[in-house]
Image: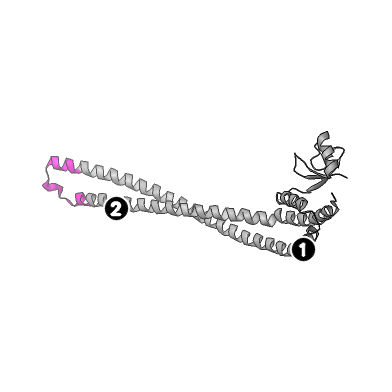
Amino acid sequence: MDISKMLDYQKLDSELFKLEKSLRDSQHKAQASQMQDTAKKAQERSSQLESKAEALYGEIDKMRSQYAVQQKKMEEIFAKNVDSLSKEEVESLLSVKDKLASNLAILDKNLTRLAESVNAVLADFNKTVKVYNMARETYAKSKGAYDAQLQEVEPKRKQITEKLQEIAKTIDPKLMEQYTKRRKDNIFPVMVPVRDSSCGGCHMELPVSMMNKLKEEGVLSCEHCRRIIYNV
């Protein structure tokens, strides 16, 4: 089998492979992807914090209502004329007052705790918003840089692709199909020479039966790395 055209194709394709690899390994692309993920997580976190703050404000409103009720009862007690009450009634009133005072102290403590929780949530929310804004800004810059890189590479990529299409017309369709399948899986180089009875790609030694087949057919698929081995 004449594989000279296939080797010419691969030589030109190696330039395309390098261009594609430079785009895949682009730091701008990686940073844009990372910032997009960071922004998404910050957005999710912000939503969670908003829900938490809303729940805390609900608890505060509920507790303030309870506080108002207890305070009103306390005011009613202070408004009473104890001179007109019996000793037992005064003692009962004082007991109620002490209980109300205790309830008010507990409610006041809980309100303070809730207020501190709200402040912590708000601080976390503001921090998360800053992270989100930073991530979006960095994403925009990285995406712009990657797009510029892509635009710079595109003319060369298009030129190589057109030349490859022309060469492909002169190659055996079956061999071209085998090459294309491996190329899509980022196996490169696809075509490798046999070297001292071993695959020129992964260096695995070929058994005698496969070496004989290679001599007969001219090409052979490596069972280990899937590259197409050709006889020099």
Can residue 41 be spotted in the picture?
yes
Residue at image point 83% right, 44% down: 217
What residue range appears in magenta? 75-93
Q: Which mark is residue 216?
A: none
Residue at image point 38% right, 53% down: 57
Pick the front one: 158 or 90: 158
Amino acid on which disc 1 is placed: Glu
- Single out the residue that lies furthest toward the front: 216
Disc 2 is placed on an element classified as helix
Majority SS type along the magenta span: helix
Q: Which mark is residue 162?
A: 1
Q: Which residue is mark 2?
A: 65
Q: Nearer the viewer, mark 1 or mark 2?
A: 1
Q: Position of residue 13 (x, y in %)?
A: 79, 55
Q: Is residue 149 left or right of residue 218?
A: left
Disc 1 is placed on an element classified as helix
- Residue 15 drawn above or below residue 218: below
- Residue 94 occupies which quadrant of the picture? top left
- Residue 9 occupies which quadrant of the picture? bottom right
